[in-house]
Amino acid sequence: MHELAITQSLFEIVLEHARQAKAKKVKSVNLVIGEMTGVVGDSVQFYLGILSKDTMAAGLKANIRMAPPQATCRACGKTFIVPEMAWRCPDCGSTELEVNGGKELFVESIEVE
Ligand SMILES: [Zn+2]
């Protein structure tokens, strides 16, 4: 049920933006979900369908972009996408990494009418 609460708060943001834009209808939403959040895009998609029923966002299309884990090496400064949770710098082998991607969870943009 993790995704329901998350989808609810994302959906509120969508409606808030739509109201500010004085929109009549929300056509689509672009979401970014970090792979490290453990949030399943399909579930968010599913709950959005339920939550948007009988609202100005009914039938909205959700485009979900999954953001892969990304880290910067503290030893050599290289920034890279972490492959399958192998937390080691591909250049120098250091494990002193700073995570700077993969935990995102936000509404990137919405399209309204
Ligand atoms: Zn390195």
Image (cartoon, grey):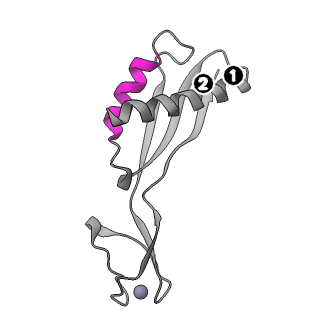
Where does the image place residue 53, in percent across and percent down from the top left? 45, 13
In depth, the one of 65 and 10 nearer the eye is 10
**Splitting the image into four quadrants, where does ligand 1 fall?**
bottom left
User: Which amino acid is tagged 2?
Assistant: Leu
Alpha-carbon neighbours of circle 2 within 10 Å: few (<14), some, or many (≥20)? some
Mark 2 and mark 1: span between their CA atoms?
A: 6 Å
Q: Secondary structure at mark 2?
A: helix
Where does the image place residue 38, in percent across and percent down from the top left? 33, 48
User: Which amino acid is tagged 1?
Assistant: Arg
Q: Quadrant of residue 21?
A: top right
State the residue position of label 2: 15
Which quadrant, please, contains the C terminus? top right
Horizontal arrangement in the rendering, residue 25 relative to residue 81 (left or right):
right
* Residue depicted at 60% across the width and 30% down the height: 111
Horizontal arrangement in the rendering, residue 45 relative to residue 31 (left or right):
left
State the residue position of label 1: 19
Residue 19 versus residue 95 in the image, above or below: above
In depth, the one of 1 and 110 nearer the eye is 1
Where does the image place residue 49, in percent across and percent down from the top left? 40, 21
What residue span does the magenta drawing correspond to? 40-52
* Residue depicted at 42% across the width and 32% down the height: 5
